[in-house]
Amino acid sequence: MPTRYWLMKSEPGEYSLDDLKNEPDQTEHWDGVRNYQARNFMRDDMQVGDGVLFYHSGKKPEVVGTARVVRTGYPDHTAQDPKNNHFDPKSTPENPIWFMVDIKFESEFKAPIPLKTLRDVAALKDMILLRRGNRLSVMPVTKKEFDTIVKLGGKK
Protein backbone atom coordinates (compact mmCIF):
# COMPACT_ATOMS: atom_id res chain seq x y z
CA MET A 1 0.00 0.00 0.00
CA PRO A 2 1.43 3.44 -0.89
CA THR A 3 2.43 5.87 1.84
CA ARG A 4 -0.34 8.20 2.92
CA TYR A 5 -0.01 11.54 4.64
CA TRP A 6 -1.89 13.09 7.53
CA LEU A 7 -2.14 16.21 9.62
CA MET A 8 -2.71 15.68 13.34
CA LYS A 9 -3.70 18.58 15.60
CA SER A 10 -2.91 18.99 19.27
CA GLU A 11 -3.11 21.90 21.68
CA PRO A 12 0.56 22.47 22.60
CA GLY A 13 -0.38 22.85 26.28
CA GLU A 14 -2.03 19.43 26.14
CA TYR A 15 0.61 17.62 24.05
CA SER A 16 3.30 19.24 21.91
CA LEU A 17 5.92 18.20 19.40
CA ASP A 18 8.51 18.68 22.16
CA ASP A 19 6.55 16.24 24.32
CA LEU A 20 6.73 13.66 21.52
CA LYS A 21 10.41 14.36 20.96
CA ASN A 22 11.09 13.77 24.68
CA GLU A 23 9.16 10.47 24.95
CA PRO A 24 11.11 7.25 25.36
CA ASP A 25 11.92 6.14 21.81
CA GLN A 26 10.27 9.44 20.70
CA THR A 27 7.06 7.42 20.28
CA GLU A 28 3.59 7.87 21.77
CA HIS A 29 -0.02 6.85 21.20
CA TRP A 30 -2.40 9.48 19.82
CA ASP A 31 -5.37 9.16 22.14
CA GLY A 32 -8.47 11.16 22.99
CA VAL A 33 -9.88 11.65 19.49
CA ARG A 34 -13.66 11.83 19.84
CA ASN A 35 -14.80 12.60 16.31
CA TYR A 36 -16.09 9.69 14.23
CA GLN A 37 -14.51 10.79 10.95
CA ALA A 38 -11.09 11.33 12.57
CA ARG A 39 -11.50 8.01 14.41
CA ASN A 40 -12.25 6.26 11.12
CA PHE A 41 -9.07 7.67 9.56
CA MET A 42 -7.01 6.27 12.45
CA ARG A 43 -8.86 2.97 12.68
CA ASP A 44 -9.26 2.18 8.98
CA ASP A 45 -6.78 4.15 6.90
CA MET A 46 -3.55 4.97 8.73
CA GLN A 47 -0.73 2.52 8.03
CA VAL A 48 2.74 2.02 9.46
CA GLY A 49 5.11 4.35 7.62
CA ASP A 50 2.53 7.03 6.81
CA GLY A 51 3.81 10.60 7.19
CA VAL A 52 2.33 13.00 9.74
CA LEU A 53 2.39 16.79 9.89
CA PHE A 54 2.30 17.77 13.58
CA TYR A 55 0.05 20.81 14.02
CA HIS A 56 -0.22 22.94 17.14
CA SER A 57 -3.77 24.28 17.37
CA GLY A 58 -5.08 26.93 19.73
CA LYS A 59 -4.10 30.59 20.00
CA LYS A 60 -1.09 30.21 17.69
CA PRO A 61 -2.04 27.58 15.06
CA GLU A 62 0.98 26.32 13.13
CA VAL A 63 2.63 23.23 11.68
CA VAL A 64 5.75 22.54 13.73
CA GLY A 65 7.25 19.28 12.45
CA THR A 66 6.74 15.73 11.25
CA ALA A 67 6.22 12.25 12.62
CA ARG A 68 5.56 8.74 11.27
CA VAL A 69 2.82 6.27 12.06
CA VAL A 70 4.49 3.27 13.75
CA ARG A 71 1.42 1.30 14.88
CA THR A 72 -1.95 1.00 13.16
CA GLY A 73 -5.26 1.71 14.85
CA TYR A 74 -6.16 -0.07 18.08
CA PRO A 75 -8.72 0.61 20.86
CA ASP A 76 -8.19 3.84 22.80
CA HIS A 77 -7.91 2.81 26.45
CA THR A 78 -8.59 6.37 27.67
CA ALA A 79 -12.23 5.95 26.61
CA GLN A 80 -12.60 3.20 29.22
CA ASP A 81 -10.97 5.04 32.12
CA PRO A 82 -13.55 6.94 34.23
CA LYS A 83 -10.77 9.15 35.63
CA ASN A 84 -9.66 10.27 32.16
CA ASN A 85 -11.00 13.44 30.48
CA HIS A 86 -11.70 11.35 27.37
CA PHE A 87 -13.84 8.72 29.14
CA ASP A 88 -16.84 7.42 27.20
CA PRO A 89 -19.05 5.01 29.17
CA LYS A 90 -20.41 3.54 25.91
CA SER A 91 -16.93 2.32 24.90
CA THR A 92 -16.10 -1.07 26.42
CA PRO A 93 -13.30 -3.60 25.93
CA GLU A 94 -15.83 -5.84 24.16
CA ASN A 95 -17.13 -3.02 21.97
CA PRO A 96 -14.51 -0.27 21.66
CA ILE A 97 -15.80 2.87 19.97
CA TRP A 98 -12.63 4.97 19.91
CA PHE A 99 -9.25 4.12 18.42
CA MET A 100 -5.72 5.51 18.40
CA VAL A 101 -2.45 5.02 16.55
CA ASP A 102 1.17 5.32 17.65
CA ILE A 103 3.40 7.96 16.08
CA LYS A 104 7.14 8.53 16.25
CA PHE A 105 8.91 11.89 16.12
CA GLU A 106 10.68 12.50 12.83
CA SER A 107 11.67 16.17 12.55
CA GLU A 108 11.15 19.64 13.93
CA PHE A 109 10.91 22.53 11.50
CA LYS A 110 13.50 25.31 11.59
CA ALA A 111 10.58 27.69 11.73
CA PRO A 112 6.94 26.77 12.48
CA ILE A 113 4.54 27.52 9.64
CA PRO A 114 1.59 29.60 10.84
CA LEU A 115 -1.91 28.93 9.53
CA LYS A 116 -1.91 32.39 7.94
CA THR A 117 1.19 31.48 5.89
CA LEU A 118 -0.39 28.20 4.77
CA ARG A 119 -3.39 30.16 3.46
CA ASP A 120 -1.06 32.22 1.23
CA VAL A 121 0.59 29.22 -0.49
CA ALA A 122 -1.01 28.49 -3.87
CA ALA A 123 -0.01 24.80 -3.78
CA LEU A 124 -2.12 24.39 -0.61
CA LYS A 125 -5.31 26.07 -1.85
CA ASP A 126 -7.32 22.80 -1.76
CA MET A 127 -5.97 21.56 1.58
CA ILE A 128 -8.72 20.27 3.91
CA LEU A 129 -7.24 22.19 6.86
CA LEU A 130 -7.87 25.48 5.05
CA ARG A 131 -11.54 24.84 4.32
CA ARG A 132 -14.09 26.88 6.23
CA GLY A 133 -15.55 25.14 9.26
CA ASN A 134 -13.09 22.23 9.27
CA ARG A 135 -12.37 21.24 12.85
CA LEU A 136 -11.08 17.70 12.39
CA SER A 137 -8.13 16.82 14.62
CA VAL A 138 -6.89 14.16 12.18
CA MET A 139 -7.16 14.66 8.43
CA PRO A 140 -5.55 13.43 5.23
CA VAL A 141 -3.15 15.59 3.24
CA THR A 142 -1.80 14.89 -0.22
CA LYS A 143 1.84 14.06 -0.88
CA LYS A 144 2.16 17.42 -2.66
CA GLU A 145 0.75 19.26 0.38
CA PHE A 146 2.99 17.29 2.75
CA ASP A 147 6.11 17.95 0.65
CA THR A 148 5.25 21.64 0.22
CA ILE A 149 4.88 22.14 3.97
CA VAL A 150 8.04 20.18 4.81
CA LYS A 151 9.97 22.32 2.30
CA LEU A 152 8.55 25.52 3.82
CA GLY A 153 9.47 24.44 7.34
CA GLY A 154 12.92 23.07 6.65
CA LYS A 155 14.39 20.58 9.08
CA LYS A 156 16.40 21.60 12.15
Image (cartoon, rainbow, N blue to C red):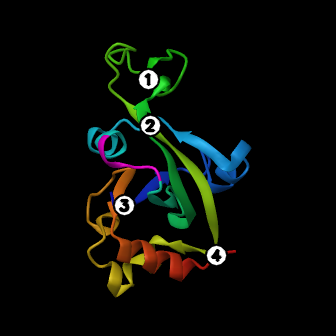
Disc 1 + disc 4, Cβ < 8 Å = no
Residue 89, horizontal then vertical, whole percent: 37, 15
Going 73% across and 42% down the picture, which residue do you hit?
A: 24
For the residues labelled 1 and 4, the Cα–Cα distance comes to 35 Å
- Position of residue 115 relative to residue 15, above or below, is below
Name the residue type under label 2: Met
Magenta region includes residue 45: yes
Q: Nearer the viewer, mark 1 or mark 3?
A: 3
Question: Does residue 14 show up?
Answer: no
Instruction: Kindly identify which numbered label has been placed on residue 100.
Output: 2
Picture disc at residue 12: none
Residue contact at pointers 2 and 4, CB within 8 angstroms = no
Q: What residue appears at the point 52 percent right and 82 percent down from the top-left corner?
A: 152
> Image height check: is 40 above or below 119?
above
Q: Identify the residue under disc 4.
A: 155
Q: Earlier in the sequence, mark 1 or mark 4?
A: 1
